[in-house]
Image: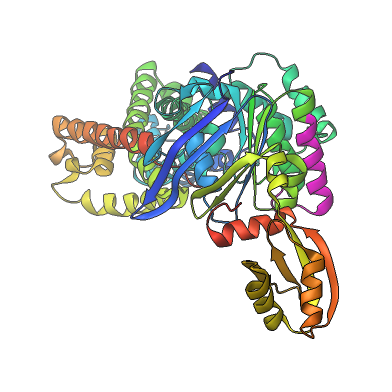
Amino acid sequence: MAQPVLQVQGLCKHYKGVKAVDGVDMQLNQGDIYGFLGQNGAGKTTTIRMMMGLIRPSSGTVKLFGESVGEGSNAVLRKVGSVIEYPGFYPNLTAIENLNLHRRLMCIQDKNAMEEALHTTGLWDARNRKASNFSLGMKQRLGIARAILHGPELLILDEPTNGLDPMGIKEIRLLIQDLAQKRKITILVSSHILSEVEQLATKVGIIHRGVMLEESTMTALKHKNRQYIGLQVDDFSKSQDLLRDELGIRDVRMEDDGWLRVYDDGQQPGEMNRLLVREGIEVSSLVAMKDSLEDYFVRLVEGGGARG
Amino acid sequence: MVDLIACEWMKWKRSRMLWLMLLGAVLPALLVFLVELNGASDSKSLDWVNYFETNLQIMAMLMCPALFSLLIGYLFAREFQERTVNNMLTGPHSRLRVLTAKFIIAFPVLLAVMLLTFLLMLGTGFFFHGAGDTLTMSILGKEAGKYALLLMLQYALTPISAAVALLWRSYIPAMGLGIFAVISELTIMQSKYIMYYPWSATLNLATNMSPGHNSASIGYSTMALAFVVPLVFIAFYFRRADVHSG
């Protein structure tokens, strides 16, 4: 089996007793678009900073292309492009001058790489404008241009759509998909926006309060989204009791959206309906439904771990 | 390493700090020129030594400590303030090399100010009566040597400003350090401890303002310590520091 592009094992970062990241394991293989999902403050950026050698882990290891990240291992970073948290640029320099500076930093001889990166990100016409005059969306794109300039095999983008309007978000998403398809770059995208990750990722890692709750392929995750029977009844409490006591259904929940949800394998909608009607409950709706990824994420985060 | 130095050089293009560098060189020279102009007469030739050294004293006492601390603070802390530090430190270079490149580029930055102010003095001196007759190669060489000595002594103070900038990740504290240095140096230069304090030692070594307390060995030892201690501190601190901003 091919060597993982990125392998993180037991990664921890503690600050004066506070666990910012606690035993995170991750693996990215060639060609993955990895969605690193978590709420604000979940530990995504700290984890990414440890991956890139900006923060020293309290314990655990990070391996990029099989090489440990740490002191004296900076050469491997030549294979990685990143935009971490905010794409900062030298405001006194133009877009192309900022890229030229990065080209020298990464010891790239080929000046055409700048032109290619600017064309890829749609910034060629703005190449001679100062970076300080760029909008946030343009800065994000310039950040990506800088990150791909040296032809990395792994691209790490930390919240690349932060602060962007819907059009900007879509542009960045299409750009990431384009990079993955045309340049065959393995990509890690962190985000707190689930729909964004859902549309992009082939693999997902969900982090919450520094703990990796789940890591799986997007396909497997979608399969895990549980089916349930949604009921709208005139007496929630009595219906819940009846379904539990008479049919032995354990997982019955009243949700804020006004639906009674019955999660159970081998649900019998007809039987439920008959029971409730027989007991004088008015059933106005009874439908088979499936959790969205968002529902799954919320359940996972609230439960603090993966459920079947 | 050459690439890193080139990067540091490129960052100064169109920087607003260049205007400060220009001002830092021009203002003292202009002040000395105006004072000389006020006392100039056709019967008196220009005293080149005095002309050069008045400017040297202003540079050593006021301009260099404040301006150079700001410039060095800017050089080291701008990556944090402009949020480019992530990019700088995720390249294929070690942090020590990044720091080394900054210390290397600090020299031409300081040199530019000193060279410009020296050349301005030389150029404006010819405005005065008899300047061409009184300027000898010996005077020129000796005064250039004094400006060069001041430059080297000021360069020895760069690790202090760099340490302050890196610790606070902003050039504002470095600017504060520069102002503090001017005030404290003016106070200490009147005491017998003049050679034990880096900024006043610089002043006395370069201009001999307090001949009674001008022990070169103490002065250069002070400067060596002022250079080495913060340099070692930076090397250890920055190599291990977590980078959260940027």
Query: In this view of the protein, can residue B124 be seen by the observer?
Result: no
In the rendered view, tell whether residue A44 sits above or below residue B143: below
Quarter of the picture containing the N terminus of chain A is top right
Q: Which residues are magenta?
A: A161-178
The front one of A191 and A204 is: A204
The front one of B204 and B54 is: B204
Residue A170 inside the magenta-drawn segment: yes
In the rendered view, tell whether residue A43 sits above or below residue A302: above
In the rendered view, tell whether residue A133 sits above or below residue B116: below
Where is residue A300? Give x, y as percent: 60, 56
Write down the quadrant of residue A203 in the picture. top right
Residue that appears at 67% across and 30% down: A32
Residue B26 inside the magenta-drawn segment: no
Where is residue A176? Give x, y as percent: 75, 35
Where is residue A120? Give x, y as percent: 80, 29
**Which is the main secondary structure of the residues drawn in magenta?**
helix
Residue A268 relative to residue B130: left or right:
right
In the rendered view, tell whether residue B79 sits above or below residue B139: below
Residue that appears at 37% across and 19% down: B141
The front one of A307 and B209 is: A307
Residue A87 relative to residue B91: left or right:
right
